[in-house]
Image (cartoon, rainbow, N blue to C red):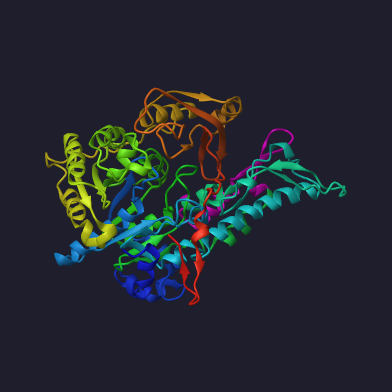
Amino acid sequence: MPTDIEIAQAAVLQPIALVAEKLKLKPEDLTLFGKHIAKLSPECTNRLKKSNQPNGKLILVTAISPTPAGEGKTTTTVGLSDALNLSFQQTQTSKVAMACLREPSLGPVFGKKGGATGGGYAQVVPMEDINLHFTGDFHAIGAANNLLAALVDNHIYQGNVLGIDPATITWRRCIDMNDRMLRNITLNRNVNDAHSFTRDSAFDITVASEVMAIFCLADSLSDLNFRLGNIQVAQNKNGMPVLASDLQAEGAMTALLKNAFQPNLVQTLEHTPAILHGGPFANIAHGCNSVMATSNALKLADIVVTEAGFGADLGAEKFIDIKCRKMNIQPDLVVLVATVRALKYHGGVEVADLNTENLNALQVGMANLQKHITNLTEHFGLQVLVAINHFASDTEAEIDLLQTEVTKLGLQAKLCKHWAQGGKGALSLAETVLSILNKPLNNIDIIKNNFKYLYQNEAYILEKIEIIAHKIYGANSVELSQAALASLTMLEKNYRHFPVCIAKTQYSFSSDPKLRGAPIGHVLHVRELRLSRGAEFIVAVCGDMMTMPGLPKVPASNHIGVNDDGNIIGLS
């Protein structure tokens, strides 16, 4: 089978204006970036915001805890979107489904994970443009972030009228690249300048920055401007907060973000409309695309298929407790992606042996899937459908066992082959989705949707962390470092109403990436508490989690290049 990039480059794309027509958008609703990429115009997004058009149905695609074997969450999101439109065409239904995804970060593109445009015959395109510079949104976010950093240091250099205490500066610079050498830096070694000062700092990857979070949670330019102004960068010498608005930074930051703030419209290989906008990681940030993207998509399409990063313990929890709370929305259905290979890995099989049938390991690994199902159905009150993302090495016995075990839990598990077959490979999944969405709420066969948040706004911050740890992660207790305890008093006093964003390893329910399956009775170690005042949440950094990842021993960049015809090769 051809590689992902070969499939993408062989595709015949429709002009983006033609794709937009499926959403009843006109040429003047678009700002074009060539033939196949566009942004929704400000006039379009403003009109949609004021529209009385009812929202479409919202499907959240999430997954079991990720493994080196891969789960295919984005691929399933794309495949399901294509399959829904194929089903509408076959039944001559004048409805439209669309995908709503995050933009890729250059960190994983050149690192270990690869890009974020799906795979096989379930991709969003043009794949190379999306995975690399796209429309420049991430560059704008990095520039806005680093402008604020420069303004903080410049203010002190120019006389420090605000009385900023350099030792309390928390604002970091960022870059959209994995570079572990930037985790700790010393700023300004120019000791010969009488006005200079030296301090220790660090870089975060752009997708972990508060500007990225604000960008994705703001629902208008005025809200964006307000939230940027609310960023706390330091304290003054009297211990009072110093905000970006004190530095008069928010206007210029908003100016840098103005064009980026408009959602991006592209298409899948099967010409399904797709909005890609924003891209916070779910292991170190809140893992959802932008509020602007989702709110616009819900006005444009009958069904919106979106995804939340990594496993449901991270992405789905944050999607619900942070994004849904902010938007006052809820998913109509959750599609939980699992693979036979990944479940065998959670059952103790090493990567080299995953292609060999192992029913015992699959049975053991089912604990991970079952825990995610329990979290979604019992703790959030959501309907769940399991999607089995098929790999060629899967045996009939393994598929049968997985489907049987899911049936015992009272749910359905649908085998999906969209990676190899495109939308037609996910038709069974799409038809089941439609049957669930079309059932009347009083039908006794449906799991009644008792949607709820995991915790209430008024709960204490530590209580929120403990609820997530106990209910979602299966932890026995939460242990805070001395640094985290020192921050907690101030945060509880002033920001108790904020939700919590847990930064922890994606590879385990625990804060230890080596604990597979569904461990119980472990301790969640909270190393640091960070205030994201503009984004309006508290980040709890757990275990050894880093907000600036590093490159692997053999980076993906080793295999990327450009051939004599000017085509990019090796991108995945």
Horizontal side of residue 186 vs 265, given as left or right: right
Give the vertical position of 274 relative to 155 (above or below).
below
Residue 237 magenta-highlighted: yes
Residue 167 spot, x, y in % from top left? 72, 37
Up-down relation of residue 69 to residue 518 (above or below): below
- Is 376 magenta? The answer is no
Give how far across and how far down residue 52 sits, in percent.
31, 59
Q: Residue furthest left?
A: 444
Q: As rendered, which of 344 and 166 lies closer to the eye?
A: 344
The magenta segment is 217-246
Visible in this render: residue 569?
yes
Between residue 273 and residue 550, name the one nearer to us: 550
State the image quarter where residue 48 is shown.
bottom left
The answer to whether residue 202 is above or below residue 492 is below
Task: Decide which of 527, 438 is in the foreground and name it.
Answer: 527
**Towards the viewer: 403 or 432:** 403
Left or right of 389 in this view: 90: left
Percent position of residue 19, x then y: 33, 71
The image quadrant of residue 87 is: bottom left
Residue 336 position, x and y percent, is 29, 44
Q: Is residue 54 visible?
A: no
For the C terminus, give its image quadrant: bottom left
Is 458 placed left or right of 386 in the picture?
A: right
Quarter holding the N terminus? Answer: bottom left
- The mark total stands at 0
